[in-house]
Amino acid sequence: MYHDSAACLVRDGLVAAAAEEERFSRLRHCLDFPSRAVEWCLEDAGLSAASLDAVAFYEKPYLKFERVLRTHLAVWPRSWKSFRRFLPIWLKHKLPVAQTVRARLGRDVPVSFVDHHAAHAASAFLPSPFERAMIVTIDGTGEWSTLCRGTGEGSRLSLTDEVRFPHSYGLLYSAVTAHLGFEVNSGEGSVMGLAAHGRPDLLERLRRIVDVRADGSLRLDLDYFSFHHDLVMTNERFAALFGPPRAPGAAVGDAHKALAASLQALLEDGVQRLVRDLHARTGLTDLCLAGGVALNCAMNASLLERTPVKRLFVQPAAGDSGAALGAALYVHARGGGARTWRMEHAYLGPAYGDDAVEAVLREAGARYRRLEPGELVEETARRLAGGEVVGWFQGRLEWGPRALGHRSILADPRDAAMRERVNSKVKRRELFRPFAPAIPWEDASRWFERPHESPFMSLALPVRPERRAEIAAVVHADGTARLQTVREESEPQFHALLRAFGRRTGVAALLNTSFNGRREPIVCSPRDAWACHRRCGLDALAIGAFIAEKAEDHHG
């Protein structure tokens, strides 16, 4: 009903299936009712809607409607344009959620509404490996909360304090994202990448309009923002302080880099204060993070570097899609269900058999060969070592916005020129955008100064200075890299590919980016993968048991 629509199925306390609607609809950040995702989750588990005991929804619509209404009335009549747009949508779609759920499922199922930040908190703590931990959730806004803090123990959550709308780290980050010419709710990652190229020269100017308190809470000077009453995020006073908004697609200048770096510095400092204050009150050193801001891997790494946090857990769909997982686990726990499931991998979505894959390849007129599993790994490693860019489509689809070795585009990380090639020819996006290295967990200390397990690509950690040139295509301008650690027991095939590439090159690491084109969701089905392969500058496709190429690209 907002963005990043998703569905998750919890059965006897275990997460049986989870997927975002965008993967089926092919509409990025899809906001539709997740009909296809629900249908797939039930089908995958061999269930029908009649089997469901309850449906959990990740927000309380009437409470959120109250906030939206109060906000518009507080600044009336400036808010008239926004009010005129939002009211019909709310009355038709966003308030009658229970009726919509029952109509779509075709039965009178109980519907539970979970507070938005409680859903985030549950998604962070309940799948974590910790018996007791600090919890921090940070996003744009839920019903009223924009961040919450507390603890989890066993199956219980205790959220003790909050910051309320309109004061929000998430909305601040999105406002600057819009000012810098990127798309809100998807371009924040571009701003994080851009920040590594700049210096925080505008930090003091930013602090004039954002008051970050000693405990990490914040207050925005609303004279510089318009998201609370208009269809745009910032106003002319903001532009007078930080320069005119950058037009989408325009050149990125030093001032843009400085603003991104200053924003990132302010966020990291504020969230470190939040965590230090919570640690001082609880004595805990394990931390669970969720909410869209928890996808900021540079911020996450700074918490390990500059706070008492020893262990950090961020589930891969930390944004709103992950609140489907949290809402389901929350309702299960609230009903007295045992906490039995721990998230050890993110492969919770659809898988496709080799017959289905081959049918797509045959229909497409592809040139392809079927290989044994070991042969497929060695052939893919050979191609990657030879400079090819390969689409890698294996097993169950990942949960969350990052490809983790099942729907990935892979390349050789050793040559810095590979970053520009993949950005310009394959992804067709800004050249400053960084890529992630996938590395066997047991090798992480060889490459990183202070390695921390990062299976969901949630940390940007410092690469050892003497090793940076060896993986130049995946090292950020500030010397960090967004690490994905791969355990053999969690992902044996991808781990084997890393090892095979290492035997050929001496570097057991690969450039890993999501298998999608510009403005597209990550591919879901074999048909999606082939269509993306056709459009993008991939050299080959390792899909199921097959190595495939476009007929015109066949190398003999």
Image (cartoon, helix red, strand yellow):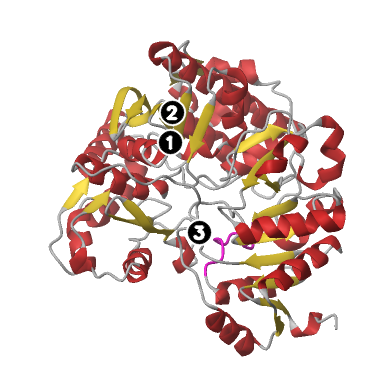
Pointer 2: what residue? Answer: 168
Q: Are marks 2 and 3 in contact (CB under 8 Å)?
A: no
Task: Please determine whether, in this image, residue 407 is positioned above or below residue 449.
Answer: below
Q: Kindly give the residue lying farthest to the left in the view shown.
A: 108
Q: Which of marks 3 and 1 is nearer the N terminus?
A: 3
> In the rendered image, which quarter is residue 106 located in?
bottom left
Q: Distance between the residues labelled 3 and 1?
A: 19 Å
Three-letter code, disc 2: Ser
| Other residues around mark 1 within 10 Å, as few (<14) / some (14–19) / many (≥20) | many
Quadrant of the rendered image containing residue 70: top left
Residue 28 badge: 3
Report if the CB atoms under discs 1 and 2 are less than 8 Å apart: yes
Mark 1 lies on residue: 140
Left or right position of 417 against 344: right
The residue stretch that appears in magenta? 514-524
Q: What amino acid is at disc 3?
A: Arg
Three-letter amino acid code at disc 1?
Gly
